[in-house]
Image (spheres, rainbow, N blue to C red):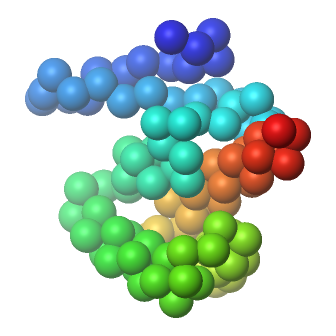
Amino acid sequence: MAANSLYNARPGGARVDRLRLRTDPSAYDPDDMFGVRRALAVLPTEAHDRFFDRWVVLTEDADYDVRRIHAAVRVERAAPASDGLGPAWVTVDDAITAYLGWRSAR
């Protein structure tokens, strides 16, 4: 268990999610490399499919290139948050930033 992790049981189930508390390169989470699980955790359940469908489109359009995915996520993050997915894109942006920092330090 990492020292900078918070383990939180989800209401109504035995599933446990880990959330990293920092966004510096040492906060890279190999279990949630791009923060998708954390992003889903900040969204209401009814928004999960909408977010994940958009995530799939972004990654496919970027040919699964991490830097291109990151750029697309930042466009999503900067877009008006009328779709209610803004907090999820912030989470994913922070996670990819941490991943890229971790990767460049290796």
Foreground pick, 54 / 78: 54
Position of residue 32 relative to residue 96, above or below, is above
Residue 40, horizontal then vertical, whole percent: 38, 53
Residue 9, horizontal then vertical, whole percent: 29, 21
Taking the spot 58% from the left edge, 84% from the top edge, the residue there is 62
Taking the spot 51% from the left edge, 30% from the top edge, the residue there is 19
Taking the spot 40% from the left edge, 47% from the top edge, the residue there is 37
Residue 36, horizontal then vertical, whole percent: 45, 54
Q: Residue furthest bottom?
A: 61
Task: Decide if residue 64 is on the left or right side of residue 100.
Answer: left
Residue 94 can be seen, yes or no = no
Quarter of the image where one finds residue 105: top right
Residue 10, horizontal then vertical, whole percent: 26, 29
Task: Decide if residue 18 is on the left or right side of residue 12.
Answer: right
Residue 64 can be seen, yes or no = yes
Task: Decide if residue 75 is on the left or right side of residue 88.
Answer: right
Q: Residue furthest left?
A: 12
Foreground pick, 14 / 82: 14
Position of residue 1 relative to residue 26, above or below, is above
Task: Decide if residue 40 is on the left or right side of residue 106.
Answer: left
Q: How many marks?
A: 0
Foreground pick, 52 / 43: 52
Position of residue 81 relative to residue 90, above or below, is below
Taking the spot 30% from the left edge, 55% from the top edge, the residue there is 44
